[in-house]
């Protein structure tokens, strides 16, 4: 065998093979073959059979970076030891085939030369009975240097504390909560997930590519941006160099085991390949345990290297990814009958994390997600959403209201609540973003166990008194409760990759009649008699402009917003072709992102204008008794003048628009104030911003991601805080925080690094700029790099 060389010009056959054994066997079966070239990279490998060898044709022996040359070394029959993996060679007496033989394989191997593993060889589990330095499975690995890899392991545990799954040049450690870390002869990389010690089988795979200097971690076949890393090891090839790979232990820098991290539970299917699998290939591996064996590290090889109290069980219990994870519960109608009673019983809780995926289809007055009652309280742990769009929480009958932009129809959302009685700290995360912090809430309380848990209905007494108006109508999935506070980065991980993609904006570069975004059949088909329309804008001009207009079959301008420079710098909004000019002289003077909302109802024609979370103007008499039809067209950056889509340059918008949403109801002031914190993934139920992903873009308009106003999750928030570290300003005190907020002169928002002197806690317990102090302790961030921190 000679690395990085190949014999060229005498090829008699080219094959795609799974491993070197298959290539070797192909050469052996062909009596013409004297040598072969084997290409290393890839899920399959090129095998070239040659009629010559380096000894006969040295002039054709050339450097070839990804090939390995092998001499067949043919000799007489069994004297060449042709059988692999301990197979017994039996010589045959045949005149037609000199030196013929057969290989007698054991029960773990098959193939003409015992080169393949049988299914039985990989169908076993290793059970680690207890924490102990002596309990391990260790095997020295000698491999050729490789420039890519995929490493996978299956495990099952209920262990508390940290546990080492693999140690050595590949190191993988997890803890009882949510964090794992791995290294490939390099720096450790942390990644997070839902807790993995729940007694189910889980898989972890690590991929790495030298050419891209990237690696990724997969849990149960899935990865995301929080589990993808750049520069995770140096620009060198990977090899074990004969060092052991240890199962069930964590190995420190001195090569010593750490008993506190010894693993208890079962391990199955450790394999390693010499290429980086694509996402779909890793996902397919996670559907069945050890459906394949690696070509660098193979699970069957670990059968005979057990140490200490590690036992081997034939017939693996590992069955692949839990298919129940794809199930959702559907609550079809408003009724007091439809509900789910949990068959188990909750333990007493001094802390908890409650997470679920939910999609609301309809709400009559209240929508009850989770109702836990015990002998002490019918609302021991209770969570619902009210029609006034507030989340309501109860612990031991004490209420807490959490105002938030609504979790309305048509979209899945991920909601998590964490609480501990040590200080009464409560946090609420929606779609991975922290939206509420409360301290001192039920400090010292215990939620007693042994009660009854109901999903989809409210227990007004223990186990009963259900009413239809409080029923949940929609879908629930992945509802889990833990008896500890799950790390916020793990909550981000759970929420990643689902829900609508709303993190984008449209940029209008210049004022022209031919620049706009148009969407047909934009709204639902209902006729509405009240609405709330909200939008984020960043304006780059001081001219009359149109932010958006909505056209129906009956009205050119059924709903619209139009700031106007003339007439005392008024702001105009439109309801069914009625233009209402409102004196508001504080719009064009603001630089940065501004949040605008208009509410209207047809009873008395009441209306209200909100700018940057504040109600600035209101009135009545605007189109009382009117109705607004559905299934109309929305236009960004222009106003409809005729039915022929002819637009005027003087109406064109210049700037940026994001997160336009329209609801078929009047949102409460507190809800609009909550939305002003930043754009998030909630959408309107009459029109939803995500629909504009399919909008028809005309002229000098571009769609960009991310929108600066997007409400950041905990991962991005923490990285942006790091961006601010080290900045200084005279008279201002550290630490610094990256926030999307205003200044002493303006509530228009930009991303800035704020010193702690300038901040306070807002009504939601989150840090915010203190307008009363009028502090200048902040640094405005310029340039796009900050916004793209992920």
Image (spheres, grey):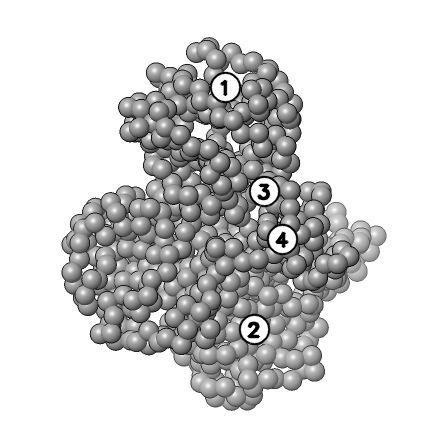
Point 36% across, 44% down: residue: 408
Looking at the image, residue 136 sits to the left or right of residue 27; the answer is: left
Disc number lying in front (1 or 4): 4
Foreground residue among 221 and 455: 455
Of pointers 4 and 3, the one earlier in the residue sequence: 3
Point 46% across, 79% down: residue: 160
Q: Is residue 718 visible?
A: yes
Foreground residue among 167 and 13: 167
Label 1 close to label 3 by CB (< 8 Å):
no
Of pointers 2 and 1, the one earlier in the residue sequence: 2
Label 2 close to label 1 by CB (< 8 Å):
no
Q: Which residue is mark 2?
A: 173
- Element type where label 3 sits in the image: loop
Crowding at label 4, few (<14), some or many (≥20) Cα neighbours within 10 Å? few
Disc number lying in front (4 or 2): 4
Q: Which residue is mark 4?
A: 773
Of pointers 3 and 2, the one earlier in the residue sequence: 2
- Quarter of the image with the N terminus in it: bottom right
- Element type where label 2 sits in the image: strand
Point 64% across, 26% down: residue: 541
> Label 3, label 2: how many angstroms apart (C-alpha)?
46 Å
Q: Which residue is mark 1?
A: 639
Position of residue 771 measured from the top left corner of the image (x, y, whole percent): 59, 49
Of pointers 1 and 3, the one earlier in the residue sequence: 1
């Amino acid at each position: 065998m000679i690395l990085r060389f190949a014999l060229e010009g005498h090829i008699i056959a080219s094959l795609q093979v799974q491993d070197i054994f298959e290539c070797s066997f192909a050469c052996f079966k062909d009596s013409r073959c004297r040598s072969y070239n084997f290409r290393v990279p890839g899920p399959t490998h090129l095998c070239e059979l040659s009629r010559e060898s380096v000894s006969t044709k040295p002039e054709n022996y050339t450097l070839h970076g990804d090939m390995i040359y092998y001499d067949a070394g043919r000799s007489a029959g069994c004297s060449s030891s042709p059988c692999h993996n301990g197979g017994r060679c039996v010589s045959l007496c045949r005149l037609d085939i000199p030196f013929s033989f057969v290989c007698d394989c054991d029960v773990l191997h098959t193939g003409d030369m015992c080169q393949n593993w049988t299914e039985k060889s990989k169908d076993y589990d290793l059970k680690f009975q207890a924490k102990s330095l002596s309990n391990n499975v260790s095997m020295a690995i000698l491999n050729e240097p490789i420039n890519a890899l995929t490493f996978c392991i299956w495990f099952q545990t209920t262990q508390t504390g940290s546990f080492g799954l693999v140690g050595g040049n590949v190191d993988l450690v997890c803890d009882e909560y949510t964090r794992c870390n791995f290294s490939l002869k390099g720096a450790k990389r942390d990644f997070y997930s839902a807790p993995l010690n729940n007694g189910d089988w889980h898989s972890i795979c690590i991929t790495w590519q030298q050419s891209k200097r990237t690696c990724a971690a997969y849990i149960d076949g899935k990865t995301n941006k929080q589990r993808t890393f750049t520069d995770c090891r140096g620009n060198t090839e990977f090899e074990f160099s004969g060092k052991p790979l240890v199962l069930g232990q964590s190995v420190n820098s001195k090569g010593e085991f750490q008993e506190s991290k010894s693993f208890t539970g079962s391990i199955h299917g450790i394999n390693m390949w010499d290429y980086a699998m694509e996402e779909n290939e890793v996902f397919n591996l996670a559907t069945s345990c050890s459906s394949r064996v690696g070509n660098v590290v193979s699970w069957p090889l670990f059968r005979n290297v057990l140490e200490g109290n590690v036992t081997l069980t034939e017939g693996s219990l590992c069955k692949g990814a839990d298919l129940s994870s794809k199930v959702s519960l559907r609550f079809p109608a408003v009724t007091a009958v439809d509900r789910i009673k949990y068959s188990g019983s909750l333990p007493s809780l001094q802390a908890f994390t409650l997470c679920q995926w939910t999609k609301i289809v309809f709400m009559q007055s209240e929508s009850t997600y989770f109702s836990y009652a015990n002998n002490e309280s019918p609302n021991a742990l209770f969570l619902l959403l009210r029609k006034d769009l507030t989340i309501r929480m109860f612990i031991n009958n004490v209420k807490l209201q959490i105002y938030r932009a609504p979790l309305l129809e048509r979209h899945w959302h991920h909601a998590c609540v964490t609480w501990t009685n040590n200080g009464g700290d409560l946090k609420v995360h929606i779609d991975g973003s922290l939206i509420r912090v409360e301290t001192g809430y039920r400090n010292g309380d215990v939620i007693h166990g042994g009660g009854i848990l109901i999903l989809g209905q409210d227990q007004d007494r223990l186990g009963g008194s259900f009413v239809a108006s409080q029923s949940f109508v929609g879908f629930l999935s992945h509802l889990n409760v833990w008896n500890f506070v799950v790390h916020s980065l793990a909550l981000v991980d759970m929420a990643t990759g689902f829900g609508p993609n709303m993190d984008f904006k449209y940029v209008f570069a210049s004022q022209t009649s031919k620049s706009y975004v148009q969407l047909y059949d934009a709204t639902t088909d209902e006729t509405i008699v009240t609405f709330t329309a909200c939008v984020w804008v960043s304006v780059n001009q001081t001219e009359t402009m149109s932010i958006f207009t909505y056209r129906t079959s009956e009205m050119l301008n059924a709903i619209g917003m139009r700031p106007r420079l003339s007439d005392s710098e008024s702001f105009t909004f439109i309801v069914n072709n009625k233009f209402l000019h409102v004196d508001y002289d504080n719009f064009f003077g603001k630089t940065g992102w501004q949040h605008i909302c208009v509410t209207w109802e047809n009873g008395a024609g009441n209306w209200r204008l909100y700018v940057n979370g504040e109600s600035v103007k209101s009135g009545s008499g605007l189109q009382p008794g009117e109705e607004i039809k559905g299934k109309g067209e929305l236009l960004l950056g222009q106003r409809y003048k005729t039915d022929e889509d002819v637009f005027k340059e003087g109406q064109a918008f210049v700037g940026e628009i994001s997160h336009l949403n329209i609801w078929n109801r009047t949102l409460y002031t507190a809800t609009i104030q909550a939305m002003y914190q930043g754009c998030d993934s909630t959408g309107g139920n009459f029109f939803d911003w995500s629909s504009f992903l399919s909008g028809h873009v005309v002229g000098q308009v571009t769609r960009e991601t991310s929108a600066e106003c997007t409400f950041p999750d905990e991962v991005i928030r923490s990285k942006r805080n790091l961006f601010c570290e080290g900045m200084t300003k005279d008279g201002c005190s550290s630490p610094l925080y990256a926030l999307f907020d205003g200044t002493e002169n303006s509530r228009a928002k930009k991303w800035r690094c704020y010193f702690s002197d300038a901040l306070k806690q807002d009504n939601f317990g989150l840090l915010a700029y203190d307008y009363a102090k009028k502090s200048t302790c902040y640094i405005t961030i310029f340039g796009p790099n900050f916004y793209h921190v992920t």
